[in-house]
Image (cartoon, rainbow, N blue to C red):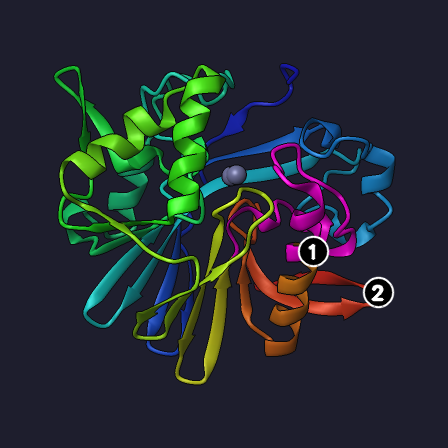
Amino acid sequence: MTTSERATPAPTLRQQWTVGDATIVSVVEAETAHIPPEFFFPGVDSAAMKEQPWLVPDFVDEHGNITLRVQAIVIDQPGRRVLVDPCVGNDKVRMLPFWNQQSFPFMENFAAAGFDAESIDLVVHTHLHADHVGWDTHLLDGAWVPTFTSARHLYTEAELEFCRQADETSGEGVYGDSVAPIVAAGLADIVDGNTDLGDGLRLESTPGHTPGHVSLWLESGGETALITGDFVHHPAQCGQPSWLEVGDQDAKMAEATRRRMLARAAELDALFVGTHFPTHPAGRITRDGSAWRFVPVT
Ligand SMILES: [Zn+2]
Ligand SMILES: [Zn+2]
């Protein structure tokens, strides 16, 4: 990355959406603008990005560079509070310099949004990349300890295995510092990729980006929402679903999953919450020729 790309302070505005009797809240860790698109989408340049003018200025700047966000999503239901994908975390040793040994004010943002760690009942991980599990643990007296101590933490077996293997080959220790302490504390549950979590919440297997990737559907009061995880990274991929993200482990499967889920979200008129979508991360998916368009709720 160049020096022009740096994380901007998290937006202070509380972003939330109502779906039936549930409230969906974004808690931002960092949002970064002016990223050359080829950094995340190999072979896609800024000129290609500008061919979808509807992306400017909320998701792409006037030069064709992109904005991305790292955020966790809280789903507040009557009697249950669910946290999805708790970001990068602090003090973790990571290969990417902008994730390495960070000191993000995430827990401050979390508190400002009205939440405390003990109030989380369930932590859902769409997958176990470093930017989706970080806050599950924090450093205390030199040891990684669970943050959400009252919560069950859900994992798929395929994702646990993928994450364990990555620790051996990547030089990072995501499993060791962010998953193993949860398992050791007895707070982990292994679930199938297609699982009904009750109260209108349902996991759907969405492999491709990683082998055990899942997305989360919410149905309440006749309304539907979808928390994507990383089957899509940026609104530009709605118009260009064949654009691969650099981390997509199985390119063909990732594209097939992306197309299937975009089509389904459009059909259901679901509130589509893009896990890495910046600025206005929730909206609707509409058909646009042979592809789709993301229409944000502002
Ligand atoms: Zn990922
Ligand atoms: Zn991610």
**9 horizontally vs 284: left or right:** left
Q: Is residue 231 magenta?
A: yes
Position above or below: 48 against 231? above
Which residue bears the numbered disc 2?
290
Position above or below: 164 against 25? above
Task: Report helix, strand or loop for mark 2.
Answer: loop
Percent position of residue 73, x then y = 39, 52
How far apart are labels 1 and 2 at the CA level? 14 Å
Q: Is residue 12 visible?
A: no
Image quadrant where one finds the N terminus: top right
Q: Is residue 37 visible?
A: yes
Percent position of residue 12, x then y = 41, 44
Residue at the spot 72% in from the left edge and 47% down from the top edge? 252
Quadrant housing residue 221: bottom left
Percent position of residue 89, x then y = 34, 30
Residue at the spot 61% in from the left edge and 23% down from the top edge? 5
Residue bounds of the magenta highlight: 228-257
Q: Is residue 233 magenta?
A: yes
Q: Which mark is residue 256?
A: 1
State the residue in front, 281 or 192. 192
Residue at the spot 55% in from the left edge and 46% down from the top edge? 230
Quadrant housing residue 21: bottom left
State the residue in front, 293 or 174. 174
Amino acid under disc 2: Ser
Amino acid under disc 1: Ala
Quadrant housing residue 46: top right
Q: Residues within 10 Å of mark 2 (few under 14, many from 20)?
A: few
Q: Earlier in the sequence, mark 1 or mark 2?
A: 1
Dots 1, 2 in contact, CB < 8 A: no
